[in-house]
């Protein structure tokens, strides 16, 4: 992405759908006036516009878009131009039903909805190439158009015959021979040996659903088809002679793993020039819902707004890491969404707070869905800059305009980065392997994503800024971190294992947990005790791993004095998994189990390896305990914490930092709560900071904490 646009300002705007108002020129001209009023600097245009751009097959209609783009350009508003492939015109589905998706049960969808297309479909690809190329030829060098917004939230699967054929081709490339495929899928089991490529079918409930190798390869293939389709889209744009950078807006839910689009986003990294994502957390849960989820034994982490903010922060960290620098917050809502069970309006202050939080985590844009509320159809009650009344004298517009002005003052932040000395591994293939496996724990207590987020949370609680990595990075990249946390790395490939070993050898600190090092990249169990190829690094072998009911009274001695508040609670409950470590371990025992199959055996171990340390947690720890553990590791390794100069802070305040190449440091203080909160600094000269309900502040400081200046209140 051209650095001038991205590094010179924090962009502000949202999805703009003028095609819904073409019979209302009054609204269209009003829109631009109001955008100026709000301080909007960028809009995403053309998402889902295919039926307006090509109302009949081969009949193109660009006049309206010409006008919109010229108008925006005249007013100095930049454009992210979307390819319209996220939804298709009815004529296309009627004439070429093969563009529509086939479900797992074999039925082809009817026309309707969006994202309802087959990535293999030659006709869908042909039509995509035509429209994308035309858009690129017409607008791809327009001075107002800055970025290609390729499609919209790619996701989903198609089980049509063409996709089956492509799947087989994909497998042929991967395995070359059926013998290798059968070996990888362990298909002699239940007599599932494949003797001809055309016997292979995608995993479906009424067919094959138990061959884990097949299931994981299918997920890999779905990502492959999607990235292949995206490459096809980008190639068409390039054929239209546009060299503009590209993004595609991604989405993952902060709340639950169920609404994941089922894609390995790491595979998009080389296709995009900048990452962008759509963030819609559910805020303001009431007390009775404000309960721990998923991890049943967890009693300490209610889903209050602070927790939600850290979870959203995990997503920000992920997309910043995918971007290798600043990312775009492509969508969010200024008030409520309209698709959660209860879609709460953001409380006063939240517009600014969540915007500053995104920026604090590395976003160089704050964008919303949507500019103007639609009058009809599915999203007519979704939040927007402008409501049905078209007025600006209301709270939401006022808060948005204030944010627009504030972001202008924050332009200097655009040329700074989040510096992370720690990284948390989140790997989609590992996740699929864990989720498909049938194991001692088959409930949602497996909780891979939740566990990764829990470790991330524990680090954030210590003021540690984290990147999120796949674990498959080069050794050089891994070595840029002082600390790497890789929870539940069940699928530990030989390549990753060897890199992690070298990383620790050369001085890195690695933390891993139960359910590590079980299978190779084909999901075949290693012929050794877990953690398989990582055993030497951790200096231990796991002889057995027991599954725990959540009432089971199994505790460990709290690993560090600092965590103990009294003798009475010097033990802490553990949950879900209990490893039995073999007595031959070389690693130093930091804590032991009390109860269960591994009674008195090691629960937390540390192995000094080369110049570094490898920590192993043999059971799932309570949040508090995990935090205590990290506190100790961080202090010993002298990893930079943004809390360094904080003496005392209310728990609801999230502190984040961005650092410029010139050493300028921007400090963000974010109060995710309904009550006033404050921070006291270690330097007595430095004034306390007090933030009202959902209050937020940015302070520019030099590295010397006492010289706080440039406060944005
Ligand atoms: C997604 C989509 C948008 C819109 C919003 C509503 O992020 O990309 O088109 O539907 O959700 O929240
Ligand atoms: Zn298909």
Image (spheres, grey):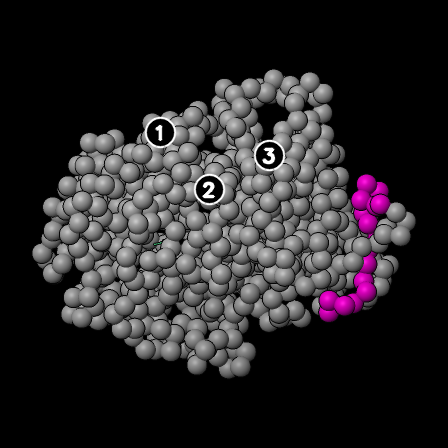
Q: Position of residue 253 (x, y in %)?
A: 49, 55
- Residue under the image location 37 percent in, 32 percent down: 6
**Residue nearest the observer in this picture, 333 or 465:** 333
Which of the two discs, 3 and 1, sits closer to the camera? 3
- Residue 245: name its quadrant: top left
Mark carried by residue 3:
1
Specify whether 352 is left or right of 404.
right
Which of marks 2 and 3 precedes in the sequence? 2
- Residue under the image location 82 percent in, 49 percent down: 558
Q: Position of residue 527 (x, y in %)?
A: 64, 64
Which of marks 1 and 2 precedes in the sequence? 1
- Residue under the image location 18 percent in, 37 percent down: 71
Circle 2 is placed at which residue position?
351
Circle 3 is placed at which residue position?
691
- Residue under the image location 55 percent in, 26 percent down: 699
**Residue nearest the observer in this picture, 344 or 116:** 344
State yes or no: residue 557 in magenta: yes
| Mark 2 surroundings: few (<14), some (14-19) or many (≥20) residues within 10 A | many
Quadrant of image for the N terminus: top left
Question: Does the residue at mark 3 contact the one at mark 1 (Cβ under 8 Å)?
Answer: no
Q: Is residue 384 visible?
A: yes
- Residue 274: name its quadrant: top left
Question: Does the residue at mark 2 contact the one at mark 1 (Cβ under 8 Å)?
Answer: no
Mark carried by residue 118:
none
Q: Secondary structure at mark 1?
A: helix
- Residue 142: name its quadrant: top left
Q: CA distance from mark 2 to mark 1?
A: 27 Å
Which of marks 1 and 3 precedes in the sequence? 1
The outermost residue toward the front is 393
Q: Secondary structure at mark 2?
A: helix
Q: In the rendered view, would you say 470 is above or below 657?
A: below
Magenta stretch bounds? 548-565
């Amino acid at each position: 992405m051209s650095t001038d646009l991205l590094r010179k300002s924090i962009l502000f705007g949202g999805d703009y759908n003028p095609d819904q108002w073409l019979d209302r020129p009054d609204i269209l001209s009003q829109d631009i006036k109001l955008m100026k009023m709000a301080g909007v600097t960028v809009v995403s245009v053309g998402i889902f516009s295919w039926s307006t751009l090509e109302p009949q097959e081969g009949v193109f209609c660009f006049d309206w878009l010409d006008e919109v783009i010229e108008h925006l350009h005249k007013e100095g508003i930049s454009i992210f131009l979307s390819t319209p492939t996220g939804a298709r015109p009815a004529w296309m589905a009627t004439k070429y039903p093969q563009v529509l998706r086939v479900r797992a049960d074999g039925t082809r969808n009817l026309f309707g909805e969006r994202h309802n297309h087959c990535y293999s479909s030659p006709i869908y690809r042909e039509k995509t190439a035509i429209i994308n190329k035309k858009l690129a030829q017409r607008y791809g060098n327009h001075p107002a158009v800055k970025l290609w917004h390729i499609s919209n939230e790619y996701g989903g699967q198609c089980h049509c015959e063409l996709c089956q054929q492509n799947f087989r081709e994909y497998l042929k490339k991967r395995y070359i021979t059926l013998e290798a495929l059968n070996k990888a899928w362990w298909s002699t089991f239940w007599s599932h040996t494949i003797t001809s490529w055309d016997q292979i079918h995608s995993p479906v409930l009424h067919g094959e659903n138990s061959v884990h190798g097949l299931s994981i390869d299918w997920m890999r293939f779905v990502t492959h088809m999607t990235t292949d389709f995206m490459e096809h889209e980008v190639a068409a744009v390039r054929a239209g002679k546009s060299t503009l950078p590209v993004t595609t807006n991604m989405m993952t839910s902060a709340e639950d793993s169920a609404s994941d689009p089922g894609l390995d986003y790491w595979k998009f990294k080389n296709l995009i020039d900048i990452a962008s994502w759509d963030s819609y957390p559910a805020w303001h849960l009431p007390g009775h819902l404000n309960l721990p989820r998923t991890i049943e034994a967890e009693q300490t982490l209610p889903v209050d707004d602070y927790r939600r903010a850290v979870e959203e922060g995990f997503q920000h960290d992920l997309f910043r890491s995918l971007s290798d620098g600043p990312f775009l917050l492509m969508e969010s809502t200024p008030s409520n969404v309209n698709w959660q069970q209860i879609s709460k309006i953001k409380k006063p202050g939240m517009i600014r707070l969540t915007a500053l939080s995104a920026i604090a985590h590395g976003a160089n844009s704050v964008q919303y869905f949507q500019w103007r509320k639609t009058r009809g159809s599915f999203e007519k009650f979704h939040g927007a800059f402008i409501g049905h009344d078209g007025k600006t004298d209301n709270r939401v517009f006022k808060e948005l305009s204030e944010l627009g002005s504030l972001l202008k003052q924050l332009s200097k932040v655009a040329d700074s980065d989040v510096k992370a000395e720690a990284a948390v591994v989140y790997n989609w293939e590992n996740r699929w392997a864990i989720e498909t496996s049938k194991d001692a724990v088959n409930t949602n207590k497996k909780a891979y994503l939740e566990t990764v987020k829990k470790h991330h949370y524990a680090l954030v609680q210590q003021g540690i800024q984290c990147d999120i990595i796949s674990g498959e990075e080069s050794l050089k990249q891994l070595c840029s971190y002082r600390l790497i946390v890789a929870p539940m790395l069940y699928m530990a490939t030989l390549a990753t294992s060897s890199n992690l070993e070298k990383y620790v050898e050369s001085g890195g600190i690695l933390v891993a947990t139960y359910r590590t090092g079980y299978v190779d990249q084909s999901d075949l169990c290693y012929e050794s005790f877990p953690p398989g190829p990582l055993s030497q690094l951790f200096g231990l072998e796991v002889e057995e791993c027991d599954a725990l009911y959540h009432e089971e009274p199994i505790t460990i001695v709290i690993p560090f004095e600092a965590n103990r508040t009294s003798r009475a609670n010097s033990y802490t409950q553990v949950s879900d998994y209990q490893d039995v470590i073999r007595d031959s371990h070389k690693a130093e025992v930091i804590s032991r189990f009390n109860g269960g199959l591994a009674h008195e055996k090691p629960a937390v171990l540390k192995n000094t390896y080369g110049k570094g340390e490898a920590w192993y947690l043999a059971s799932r720890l309570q949040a508090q305990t995990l935090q205590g553990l990290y506190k100790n590791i961080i202090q010993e390794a002298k990893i930079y914490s943004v809390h360094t100069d904080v003496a005392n802070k209310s728990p609801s305040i999230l502190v984040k930092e961005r650092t410029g190449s010139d050493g300028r440091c921007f400090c963000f203080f974010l109060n995710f709560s309904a009550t006033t909160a404050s921070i006291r600094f270690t330097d007595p000269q430095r004034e306390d900071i007090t933030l009202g309900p959902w209050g937020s502040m940015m302070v520019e400081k030099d590295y010397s904490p006492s010289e706080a200046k440039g406060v944005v209140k």
